[in-house]
Image: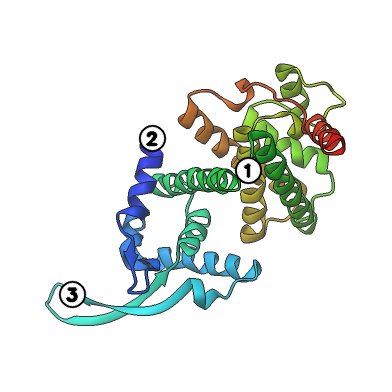
Amino acid sequence: MNDLVSLGKGAFDDLKLTSPEGVDYWRARTLQSRLGYETWENFENAIERAMDAARVSGYQVENQFRATTKLVESGSGARRHVKDYFLTRYACYLIAMNGDPSKREIAAAQSYFAVQTRRQELADANAAGASEDDQRIIVREKVRESNTALKHTASSAGVTNFGFFGDAGYQGMYNASQARVKKMKGIEPNEDFLDCIGPLELTANEFRIRLTEEKLRQSKTKGQRPAEQVHGNVGKKIRQLVISEIQRPPEQLPRAESIKKIASRKKKELKSK
């Protein structure tokens, strides 16, 4: 595990608490310094953005961010109660996604959650007895759904040229246009790019799409060019994560068999049974 992900792991796993019912939770005041925030006021701004994200996604905010207090002692020895929160793992994830991206601790937390999400997807697929082909089909469908949500949010942000907007994300993640990356990987022009990449690369693209959609909503970005910049910046972060994890950029990952061909073959196999 690289240093960045290890730092993110320490910020969460080392601070985890467990309730008498066996439920994991975190305290916001304790998490604050681990995420690089010197003042509570700035950290609470990130918490409030995360709460807005939970609300928009249909979650009961009170179930994820439970308000509480913490008794602290001042330099004079006086004791007082200050505002605090009990946080679920999902709440911690949203705080990381809505934190200050210039902070190394926030970048580490985002990397940590990206790795954890991928591991959970693989564990779920393996528990269900899914093959790698099945996993790719499942993740590809998630990417399709995420792209639909991103297109809707981008449209609300004022994007009118979705070709330019989409390519901004690829430029950030691959340092090249999608058309150029297809040539590099040997993917035919008439083939769908996302149908022809392996599970790791597909998951990385899903994370790019989901994070861009979240950033557009939370930042309230308006306009074609600002939205492209958001997509491009997110793509660059995913690129850095991939390089740090496997020591090579995503454009160097090999192409995979087209998911459409896999689905067609599975359909024929079912008919022959």
How far is mark 2 from mark 1, CA to CA? 21 Å
The kind of residue on which mark 2 rests is: Met
Residue 37 visible, this orientation: yes
Q: Vertically, is 208 above or below 257?
A: below
**What's the mark number on residue 1?**
2
Q: Which marked residue is nearer to the observer: mark 2 or mark 1?
A: 2
Residue at the (33%, 67%) spot, across then down:
18
Q: Which type of secondary structure does the marked residue at label 1 adopt?
A: helix
Image quadrant in which the N terminus is located: top left
Q: In the rendered view, does 10 fall on the left or right side of 203?
A: left
Q: Which marked residue is nearer to the observer: mark 1 or mark 3?
A: 1
Residue at the (65%, 30%) spot, across then down:
198
Sequence-wise first label, 2 or 3: 2
**What's the mark number on residue 253?**
none
| x, y percent for residue 231 | 66, 43
| Foreground of the two, 63 or 240 | 63
| x, y percent for residue 235 | 62, 38
The kind of residue on which mark 1 rests is: Arg
The kind of residue on which mark 3 rests is: Ser
Residue situated furthest front in the rendering: 273
**What's the mark number on residue 208?**
1
| x, y percent for residue 14 | 30, 54
Which residue is identified by label 3? Answer: 74
Sequence-wise first label, 1 or 3: 3
Residue at the (64%, 27%) spot, across then down:
175
Location of residue 251 by image quarter = top right
Q: Vertically, is 147 above or below 171?
A: below
How far is mark 2 from mark 3, CA to CA? 39 Å
